[in-house]
Every structure is written in structure tokens, then in C-alpha cells.
């Protein structure tokens, strides 16, 4: 994994941020990992590479629970707080004045959706959004997370595997959905992941420049 690694203190422990600078000035793409995984996930790395190639700085954020060596995720409120504090730290320092796009894979995508408005993000990138938890024998059906996606009011890209057991969300007024071969891991066609992200960021950049 390339880029500088820095630690940022949050209310729930230190977060580790891997910064991948770009030559351009498209803005800052902040990416979070899934519940049990890390920022080395193949689809996150593909998205990061495409963003840097398109002139966007990238910061891959390891949540405090992962930095502490735990695999079980922290509660949603703690995830959102730590993520928000990391974003504010970066935007008040090295990336002050930058346009912000927030995103991530799976659980990280949910965090991005929930915090996008408060952070003033200009876009949201969701890789393998966990729309509907798969049913388990003898267990109640868990609720859909569609409301988190629908609450986002800025341009959003969802990249989803066609066989994702969490399902595939529909496109919406502010939401593009790219469906690729594969499942929740999104690692079957990484060039396609990168292309989807790169093309979307290019359109987003063009819109920002025109506004």
C-alpha cells in the first residue's frame, strides 16, 4: 500500500490514515473499510488508484477499532464520530479548502452516507453497499439500509456486484448504480471498478468546475 500513514486522535482512539497524494487538485476522496476488513481491500485500492490518476488526493481511513487490533466493528455512532473527526482534521490542515468526496466499501459506505451532509461532501462513493442483510434461518429479517442511501442529496455512485447477497440498490435522482460481475467482495473485475470510479469522478469534477 503506497502513501504516507499518519495517526489522528479521535474520541474513540487513534485512527490511521493512509494518504495518497495526486498531482491534480480535484479534491480529497476519503475512503473507509468494511466491518471486518481493512483499507487493503482490492476494490478500495482500485478506487484509490483511479482517483489519484484523475487528480484526486485519497485518504484511506482505518477506524480506531481496527488500529487497536479488533475485528468486531464499533457501534455506528462511534464509527461516525471517529470518521467525522478524521475528516475535519484533514480539512482543517493539509487539505483545507478542498472539495470532499466521502466513500468506502460495505460498512464504510454506510458511514460515508450517514456523515456526508454534516461534512459538506460534494459526492459519495459506495462500494458494495450492504443494502439488505441476508436472511438467516430462524432469525427475524433485518431491516433494509436503503434509507441511508436515499438520505444522501449529493451525487452518489454505487458500485455493486451482480451476485451480492445484500442485493443491488436501484438508481435514484442523485444516484448512479454500476453493476459488475461478482459478489460482495467486488474483486472479480478490478479494472472495471477503477473505470467506474474514475469516470464518475471525472464527471463530478467537470460539474464542480462548471458551477
Image: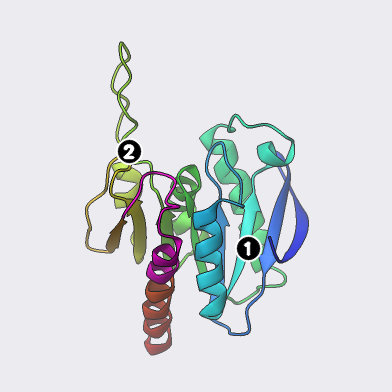
If the image is split into quadrants, where does the C terminus sit? bottom left
Q: Residue furthest top?
A: 138
- At horizontal 61% and vertical 51% (from top left) the residue drawn is 39
Residue wearing tag 1: 59
Direction from residue 28 to residue 165 in the image, left or right: left
Membership of 192 in magenta stretch? yes
Q: Nearer the viewer, residue 194 or 16?
A: 194
- Lateral position of residue 77 relative to residue 193, left or right: right
Q: Residue at x 30, y 17 (%)?
A: 140
Question: Residue 25: percent from the left, percent from the top?
Answer: 58, 83
Q: Residue at x 45, y 61 (%)?
A: 190
46 sits to left or right of 155: right
Q: Quadrant of the N terminus?
A: bottom right
Q: What's drawn in magenta, residue-wise? A: 181-197
Q: Is residue 87 above or below residue 76?
A: below
**Residue 79 seen in the figure:** yes
Dot 2: element: loop
**Mark 1 or 2: the one toward you:** 2
> Residue 127: x, y in percent?
42, 53
Label 1 and label 2: CA atoms lie apart by 26 Å
Point 41% across, 63% down: residue: 193
Q: In the image, residue 68 lies at what x, y percent?
A: 74, 36
Provide the residue designation for mark 2.
Answer: 166
Amino acid at each position: 500500500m503506497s502513501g504516507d500513514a499518519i495517526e489522528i486522535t479521535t474520541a474513540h482512539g487513534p485512527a490511521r490514515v493512509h494518504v495518497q497524494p495526486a498531482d491534480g487538485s480535484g479534491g480529497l476522496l476519503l475512503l473507509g473499510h468494511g466491518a471486518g476488513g481493512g483499507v487493503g481491500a482490492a476494490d478500495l485500492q482500485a478506487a484509490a488508484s483511479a482517483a489519484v490518476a484523475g487528480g484526486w488526493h485519497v485518504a484511506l481511513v482505518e477506524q480506531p477499532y481496527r488500529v487497536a487490533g479488533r475485528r468486531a466493528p464499533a457501534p455506528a455512532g462511534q464509527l461516525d464520530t471517529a470518521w467525522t473527526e478524521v475528516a475535519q482534521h484533514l480539512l482543517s490542515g493539509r487539505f483545507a479548502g478542498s472539495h470532499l468526496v466521502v466513500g468506502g466499501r460495505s460498512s464504510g459506505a454506510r458511514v460515508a452516507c450517514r456523515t456526508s451532509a454534516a461534512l459538506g461532501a460534494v459526492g459519495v462513493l459506495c462500494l458494495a453497499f450492504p443494502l439488505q442483510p441476508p436472511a438467516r434461518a430462524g432469525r427475524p429479517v433485518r431491516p433494509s439500509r436503503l434509507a441511508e442511501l436515499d438520505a444522501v442529496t449529493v451525487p452518489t455512485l454505487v458500485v455493486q456486484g451482480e451476485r451480492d447477497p445484500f442485493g443491488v440498490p436501484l438508481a435514484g435522482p442523485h444516484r448512479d448504480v454500476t453493476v459488475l460481475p461478482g459478489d460482495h467482495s467486488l474483486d472479480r473485475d478490478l479494472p472495471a471498478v477503477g473505470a467506474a470510479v474514475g469516470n464518475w469522478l471525472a464527471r463530478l469534477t467537470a460539474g464542480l468546475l462548471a458551477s
